[in-house]
Amino acid sequence: MIPAATLFGLGAALIIGLGLFGVILHPEPLRKVLAFNLLGSGVFVLFGVVARRGGGRLEGVPFGDPVPQALIITGLVVAFAATVLAVALVLRLAQADWTHADDSHRGGQGQVPQPSPDAAPDTSADLSPGLPPDQARAPSPRAVGPAAASRSVPNASPPAAA
């Protein structure tokens, strides 16, 4: 029968191998973060095996070496903080990529212009240029969009092509 420490050691080696495989193979940043966490978990299990084997017996009860146990606890805290930082950086990278992808169809002109909340359509302008006010009429419902708006406002230039 194989001792428990050996089984845990082999399991730790398998987990480390899977994590290393993921870090090397996957190009996506989030998968690399997850694979690196898997690799770290394998190292923690391996440290636990070493702590158990390096311990002794006190009144017949086995105990582990406290130094590797302290390293495991400290490593877990550091690994959690590093994971949070890495995920935040991956999210920031993804947001930057999305913003860049949104700009690509405009030729990289910058942010999307947002209409101001207090901007209202100008209804005081003459709706039919060249006609007296009593003969002016509103545009038909089919005449909508930027081209219709430029036709209904006197001295308006046509909208610039994107």
Image: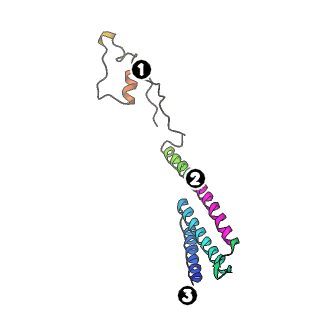
The secondary structure type at the circle numbered 3 is loop
Residue 55 percent location from the top left of the image: 68, 79
Tally of marks? 3
Residue type at the position of mark 3: Ile
Q: What segment carries the magenta color? A: 67-86
* Crowd class of label 1 (few under 14; some 14 to 19; many from 20; radius 10 Å): few
Distance (Cα) linking label 2 and label 1: 45 Å
Quadrant of the image occupied by residue 19: bottom right
Is 14 situated left or right of 115 in this image? right
* Crowd class of label 3 (few under 14; some 14 to 19; many from 20; radius 10 Å): few
Ranked by sequence position, the earlier of labels 3 and 1 is 3
Distance (Cα) linking label 3 and label 1: 85 Å
**Residue for badge 2:** 88
Distance (Cα) linking label 2 and label 3: 43 Å
Residue type at the position of mark 2: Ala
Residue type at the position of mark 1: Asp
Callout in the foreground (2, 1): 2
Identify the residue shown where x is 29% and y is 24%.
140
Callout in the foreground (3, 1): 3
Coloration mode: rainbow
